[in-house]
Amino acid sequence: MAYQQYPVRFALAAAATLALLLSGCAGLPGYPAATGTPVAQLVAGIDCQAPNLNSNWMVFPEGVPTQTDLTAAHPDAPEPGTVPADFEPVAAHVCTFKGSVVDDQGRWAAVTVETRGGDFGPLLSALALPSDQAGFNQACTADMEFVPELWLENATGEAMRAAWPRTACGKTKRATWTALDQLELTDTVKLPLVLEITRPALDAGCVMSTGTPEQSLQFGVTGLQTSTTTGEVGENILPVPVPPAEMLSYDGVDGASVCVYTVDPVTEPEPGELRDSEGMEFSDNLLESMLTLQFGTFESATVLGTDAAALLAAAASAVPAPACTADLTRFAVLWPERAGTRLDSPIQVELDGCQRLFVPASEALVPAPALLAALIG
């Protein structure tokens, strides 16, 4: 899916999920069937980085940053199942998809792996409980339960992915949680999954994706700035509008950090995409605009020296730009600094196309030629 279409598609997917939870909870995606859970398959070892595990927790828009997907080197994990009768665990590994890891490449979304040991009798008994069958017109609460992946490992290093016994509403039975809490926590480690923010962007304080300057006029925000996530891994990932701060003076600005973005191509809505559940076409102009939002992907970062930054003082009083429809492929977001402190009023400049300048709560302006030259290099 294209990133600019993500907010609406996510909303539709969320609505479908909510409807499923309200109408009945058997057969939830990613969960074993309520009855007849197969015996778990033994594999060479645990793998909390398997791509088919985190895909149920994290939704990363396609093509936003240029990312290295660590999980590509890992095979899919087997389906969860019941514990084989002759399997004797010596360790339980609980994989929770949250947190982050920072290294030389940047900031990664992570999976937190807790290792537990001790008496596995209560846990094996809890896992042996059958899952309940949903009743006719089963009534269930609409909250969604995020359940960690559970691996069991034996003395030879063989491992199995355990299925959590479920209630009639698809929620986990408390006996498994209680048994896990009784085990001793012996180790906790965070493992990288997907590169969220590259090291150059992280060092420069740049987000990996942001809306084009044109959108600051259309939506009354400063660029619809986003990173690849908006919080803990596993949370819904949506563009977060950044409301414009009260107009600040750029007087005395003595520097600026610059984030350069390449404009992503616009993907037109697919046939039928603008229809509701009854097949009627949406006529909401805002919805149609959301489907065609145009974003930029982080390309590079630099800084403006004192001389070039001094040109920003006149930005808010610059000449209004004439009407223009030239195609934009690159733009910059400037974060002015005064005495080492970053101001909350970024300036956006189109590096090609119409080559306009945008400040919060203002129309498109004509940038100073010297400033444009300094940015284009």
Image (spheres, rainbow, N blue to C red):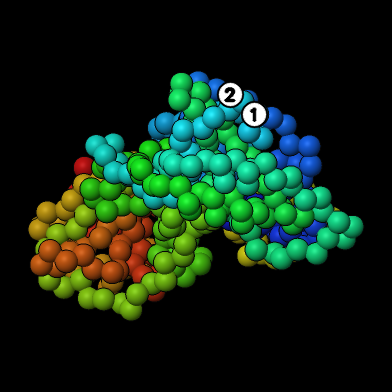
> Could you say which quadrant of the image residue 14 lies in?
bottom right
Q: Residue at x 16, y 66 (%)?
A: 341
Position in image of residue 220 (x %, y %): 47, 70
**SS at circle 1:** loop
Pointer 1 with pointer 2, Cβ within 8 A: yes
Along the viewing direction, whichever of 75 and 271 lies nearer the viewer:
75
Position in image of residue 287 (x %, y %): 65, 61
> Could you say which quadrant of the image residue 125 lies in?
top right
On residue 42, which mark appears?
2
Is 209 on the left-hand or right-hand side of 234?
A: left
On residue 84, which mark appears?
1
**SS at circle 2:** loop
Pair 1/2: label in front: 1
Instruction: Give the Cα distance between marks 1 and 2.
Output: 9 Å
Residue furthest bottom as drawn: 246
Q: Residue at x 40, y 47 (%)?
A: 184
Position in image of residue 149 (x %, y %): 54, 42
Q: Is residue 49 visible?
A: no
Is 276 on the left-hand or right-hand side of 241?
A: right
Position in image of residue 212 (x %, y %): 44, 54
Nearer the N terminus, badge 1 or badge 2? Answer: 2
On residue 8, which mark appears?
none
Q: Is residue 360 visible?
A: yes
Q: Residues within 10 Å of mark 1 (few under 14, many from 20)?
A: some
Q: Residue at x 18, y 51 (%)?
A: 303
